[in-house]
Amino acid sequence: MFDNNVRSYDFKVELAKCFNNLGTVYLAQHRATGQHVAVKKFLVEDLKNEIGHIMEEAKHLREFDHPNILSYHTAFVHQLDLYFVLPLMCYGSCRDTMGNYFETGFPETLLICILRDVVHGLEYLHRKGYIHRSIRASHIFLNESCAVLGGFRVCTSFLGEGKRVRNLHELPAHSTKSLNWLAPEVLAQNLHGYTEKSDVYSLAIAACELANGLEPFYSFSTTLMLTEKLRGYQPQLLDASTIPSEEVLAQAMETAPGDATSATTRQIYASRQFSEALHKFAEQCLESDPKDRPSAAALLSHAVFKSVKHTNIREQFAVHYIQTVDFNTIKEHDINLADEFGQLAMDTSGGFEWDFEES
């Protein structure tokens, strides 16, 4: 359906930079079908040693076929530019959606719908012999109907030279920005190594991030974060039963105790109560010993997902009166007006932005 001719696409607006500012993401429309897509554009000369990582990610995405795994329509080179044409994630990443609508975290039902979709994608990956190694809110994307797992730059396989490796040992490349989400056994860098259970730990860290609107270990030094993980410290979903002291929350938010922002945030946390099943989900996945964590396959039948059997992400966005942009209102002359993109067609006052920096 999507051809490899750059002239087949109308580039409408620049959405964001990506891959450490080496690439640019555009909203574009495929002329033949009228379908809107996201196009990542890289100048090949700028990539230098990084092109291998980009092509490795592209290879992985071509091998996967699952509704909760990011795919791409086509890739091609035109003159000195490399293009990837991908499905348009109309709400951006979960981190974007929190910034636009849910600054103190997703409502529980919507959060569980997102986690359910990610677990389905994760189970598929693990069944095929892959570990994601970078699960986080910025790598979980939302379209009109489901959550989609992306960010496969450091994804790796257990399969090599015709056999399956039992454990991996190397720290993922480009892992500096993902340290807070990595499992303790990945960070330990010892002879035991790590398995796909490390993704389950990262999923739980992402669940805390999605529930709280705050990245766990955000205010920790790298050394303290590692020490706390190795001794079994578990971040929590913040509600009336787990709300930290004003001083601790202010430190996590990097504000002064008594600051109006942290006080308001604390009040929001104190006025809500997550279900016991959701708390248990996070606790079980955050076990420091990977043998004590459930597998992604086992998580599919976790009690927490019973509460969302009869709903989905589309319905939950409607409950909160969140609609997508009418992309047909965006004209070609809007290109490079990324700062104004958030004001084009939203019916909320929160603005609308994408951030592809980590994707």
Image: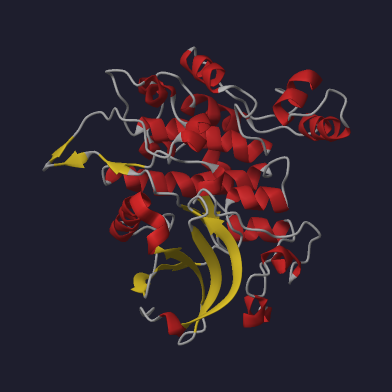
96 left or right, relative to 343 = left
238 left or right, relative to 258 = left
Question: Which residue appears farthest toward the bottom when viewing the image?
Answer: 32
Q: How is the image coloured?
A: secondary structure
Residue 27 lies, in percent from the top left, at 56, 71
Q: Nearer the viewer, residue 197 or 193?
A: 193
Q: Is residue 225 visible?
A: yes
Res. 165 image quadrant: top left
Kindly identify the residue that appears in the image at 52 percent across and 63 percent down. Answer: 24
Residue 70 lies, in percent from the top left, at 43, 57
Res. 213 image quadrant: top right
Q: How many marks?
A: 0
Q: Nearer the viewer, residue 110 or 303?
A: 110
Kindly identify the residue that appears in the image at 40 percent across and 18 percent down. Answer: 289
Residue 180 lies, in percent from the top left, at 53, 30
Position of the N terminus, as image quadrant, is bottom left
Kindly identify the residue that appears in the image at 85 percent across and 34 percent down. Answer: 264
254 left or right, relative to 148 = right
| Image position of 167 with respect to 76: above or below | above
Kindly identify the residue that appears in the image at 60 percent across and 68 percent down. Answer: 14
Question: Which residue appears farthest toward the left when viewing the image?
Answer: 162
Q: Is residue 53 visible?
A: no
Residue 81 lies, in percent from the top left, at 40, 69
Q: Nearer the viewer, residue 45 or 132?
A: 45
